[in-house]
Image (cartoon, rainbow, N blue to C red):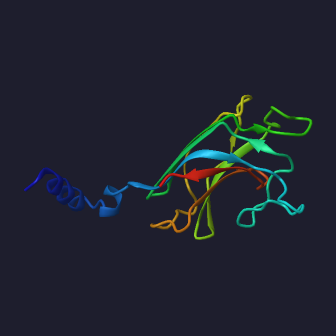
């Protein structure tokens, strides 16, 4: 018997489900788009019903990987206000990752932004996202629920 089959048989014998062995990537995002508060015509630039922050936000870099078991790893750099009196600062904000699968949201805990706008999230999404994740959208949102940045899906 091949080694991989032996491991699978051993793990099942130990009561470990096959799904736990297959904790591969569910969705990935590379790069980010900062928010603009208004669309053309003055309407709020909402995404899936989530309103943007009250000022523009910019982000230098965003990398996100979500596993099939709901674990998420987010590395963000340079998430800063792109306008208003606090331009170039974090506005003392904390953020969370919010993944939408088929329009249903799955959130992480809040983490504070570093003074340079960098942040790291290693958490488990609640509730756990479905497999597969239909029409994935990743938002970086404030504690108040406004979106500051969005991930670019890596296909």
Question: Residue 94's x, y, as percent?
Answer: 74, 42
Asked if residue 121 can be seen in this view, the reply is no
Q: Give the residue drawn at x 63%, y 69%.
A: 103
Which quarter of the figure has residue 9?
bottom left
Quarter of the image where the N terminus is located: bottom left
Camera-nearest residue between 31 and 54: 31
Q: Give the residue drawn at x 33%, y 57%.
A: 22
Question: Residue 53's x, y, as percent?
Answer: 82, 51
- Vertically, is 23 above or below 82? below
Residue found farthest to the top: 116
Camera-nearest residue between 38 and 120: 38
Question: Residue 87's x, y, as percent?
Answer: 85, 34
Residue found farthest to the left: 1
Which quarter of the figure has residue 40?
bottom right
137 displayed left or right of 18: right
Q: How many marks?
A: 0
61 displayed left or right of 86: left
Asked if residue 83 can be seen in this view, the reply is yes
Question: Residue 73's x, y, as percent?
Answer: 52, 45
Residue found farthest to the right: 85
- Vertically, is 87 above or below 142? above
Q: Give the residue drawn at x 90%, y 39%.
A: 84
């Amino acid at each position: 018997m091949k080694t991989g089959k032996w491991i699978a048989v051993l793990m099942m014998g130990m009561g470990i489900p096959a799904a736990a062995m297959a904790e591969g990537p569910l969705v990935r995002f590379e790069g980010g788009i900062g928010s603009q508060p208004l669309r053309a015509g003055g309407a709020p630039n909402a995404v899936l019903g989530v309103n943007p922050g009250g000022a523009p936000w910019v982000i230098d870099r965003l990398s996100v990987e979500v596993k099939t078991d709901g674990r998420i790893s987010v590395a963000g750099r340079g998430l800063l206000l792109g306008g208003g009196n606090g331009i170039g600062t974090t506005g003392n904000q904390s953020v969370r990752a919010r993944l939408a699968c088929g329009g249903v949201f799955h959130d992480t805990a809040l983490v504070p932004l570093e003074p340079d706008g960098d942040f790291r999230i290693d958490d488990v999404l609640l509730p756990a996202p479905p497999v597969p994740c239909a029409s994935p959208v990743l938002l970086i949102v404030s504690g108040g629920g406004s979106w500051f940045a969005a991930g670019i899906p890596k296909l």
